Image: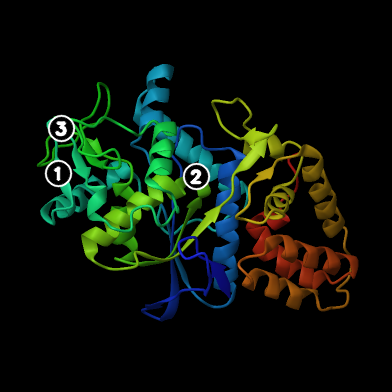
């Protein structure tokens, strides 16, 4: 199998590690901030990585899969304040709703889903380590900042110029302040920062506060997968600034290069011509789709798009996949086994080409190859394959 690595832009053989029982895949995928996590953009990302996990495991290669939960984060606190609820209750409720959605969509759950609020000790230790090694500095504003200029490859993963990085930081409202008492350069970012009113706060040698955004993933991937991961994944919107910063932190902290042997990024899902987002009011959530289609149809529809590309959600297209699933349910007998399964395997081995795999599935349906269809659905739809539509 080959995968396209975002950093090098090349197709690489699937990177694997030596595990206790032979080769294994160490996979880290950036998870959700549990405050409004049920939209199709998220479901797309996690279904793509679910196919990767299932495909690799079907080859007899164990996967160690870690996906974090960012339950300490600005948008979560803002939402809790607006709703008048505690951030813990909101995070717990939204995390459960997200896991429930993904369970209905038939995912093979990650082996570990660490929460930031449970991992403060390791996160603080990572920040301390970077400070001791001279990659970070304390400022009078109470923050510990990572000094981006100390990491020569900063900007390589996203292929962005300094100007372009600053533009994205401004869009993300992460630019912060430069000057006496604050950070030294616009690209520097907080590893630790003071907490606002009503926000959780933990003691540290840099003063009381909470972690910056990026350091959590460096700390959690190291705790559960070691200094190096085979594949690091997430949505394309995370390449900068999140993954760029994670890479800089992890490699500066451990000296182990590369931190990730391959980076895989999923495209953005648009609706009404724009990226789905809460603020634009054009979100389609998983539950909306399950009112009109079975979980397997939702999965097949999501996976009918090449994973790296952005695409536009369309209701009529979802309905076509519901018809396909109904046709599969109506299949009788064992049928002939054709060449579709070989084509299916070749498709997934070619950087997880799920649209091509779905074409192989359609051919197997057309030729009545029921066993082949079941094999393919087990990978593409996971345990959602057998669930009926909610009606
Ligand atoms: Zn992350």
- Locate residue 316, reporting x and y percent: 82, 40
| Disc 2: which residue | 237
Q: Would you say residue 18 is visible in this rendering?
A: yes
In the image, the residue with mark 3 has its CB under 8 Å from the nearest atom of ligand 1: no
Mark on residue 44?
A: none
Separation of residues labelled 3 and 2 (CA atoms): 29 Å
State which quadrant residue 254 falls in.
Answer: bottom left
Vertical placement of residue 391 versus 337, above or below? above
Determine contact: label 3, label 2, CB under 8 Å. no
Instruction: Tell me the element at label 1.
Output: strand
Mark on residue 137?
A: 1
Pointer 3 or 2: first along the chain:
3
Vertical placement of residue 35 versus 217, above or below? above
- Locate residue 280, reporting x and y percent: 58, 26
| Disc 3: which residue | 142
Q: Residue at x 29, y 38 (%)?
A: 186
Mark 3: few, some, or many residues within 10 Å (few <14, many ≥20)? some
Q: Is residue 162 left or right of residue 331?
A: left
Separation of residues labelled 2 and 1 (CA atoms): 28 Å
Pointer 1 or 3: first along the chain:
1
- Locate residue 160, reporting x and y percent: 43, 49
Residue furthest to the bottom: 22
Pointer 2 or 1: first along the chain:
1
Instruction: Tell me the element at label 3.
Output: loop
């Amino acid at each position: 199998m080959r995968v396209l690595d975002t950093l090098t832009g090349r197709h690489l053989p699937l990177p694997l590690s030596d595990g206790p029982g032979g080769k294994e895949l160490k996979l880290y995928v950036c998870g959700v901030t549990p405050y409004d996590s049920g939209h199709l953009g998220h479901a797309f990302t996690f279904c793509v990585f679910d196919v990767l996990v299932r495909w690799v495991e079907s080859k007899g290669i164990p996967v160690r899969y870690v996906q974090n939960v960012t339950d300490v984060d600005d948008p979560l606190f803002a939402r809790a304040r607006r709703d008048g609820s505690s951030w813990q209750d909101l995070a717990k409720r939204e995390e459960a709703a997200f896991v429930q959605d993904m369970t209905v969509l038939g995912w093979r759950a990650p082996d570990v889903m660490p929460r930031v609020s449970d991992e403060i000790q390791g996160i603080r230790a990572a920040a301390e380590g970077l400070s001791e090694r001279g990659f970070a500095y304390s400022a009078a504003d109470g923050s510990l900042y990572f000094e981006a200029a100390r990491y020569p490859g900063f900007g390589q993963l996203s292929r962005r110029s300094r100007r372009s990085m600053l533009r994205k930081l401004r869009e993300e409202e992460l630019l912060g302040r430069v000057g006496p008492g604050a950070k030294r350069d616009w690209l520097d970012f907080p590893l630790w920062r003071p907490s606002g009113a009503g926000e959780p706060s933990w003691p540290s040698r840099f003063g009381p506060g909470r972690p910056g955004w990026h350091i959590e993933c460096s700390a959690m991937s190291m705790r559960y997968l070691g200094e190096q991961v085979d594949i690091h994944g997430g949505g394309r919107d995370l390449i900068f600034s999140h993954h760029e910063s994670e890479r800089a932190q992890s490699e500066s902290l451990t000296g182990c290069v590369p931190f990730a042997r391959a980076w895989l990024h999923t495209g953005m899902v648009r609706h009404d011509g724009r990226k789905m987002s809460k603020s634009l009011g054009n979100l389609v959530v998983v539950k909306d789709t399950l009112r009109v289609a079975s979980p397997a149809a939702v999965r097949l529809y999501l996976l009918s798009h090449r994973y790296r590309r952005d695409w536009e959600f369309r209701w009529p297209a979802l309905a076509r996949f519901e018809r396909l699933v109904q046709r599969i349910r109506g299949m009788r007998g064992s049928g002939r086994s054709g060449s579709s399964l070989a084509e299916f395997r070749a498709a997934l081995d070619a950087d997880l080409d799920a649209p091509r795999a779905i074409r192989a599935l359609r051919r197997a349906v057309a030729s009545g190859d029921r066993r082949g269809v079941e094999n393919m659905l087990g990978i593409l739809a996971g345990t959602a394959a057998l669930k009926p539509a909610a009606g």
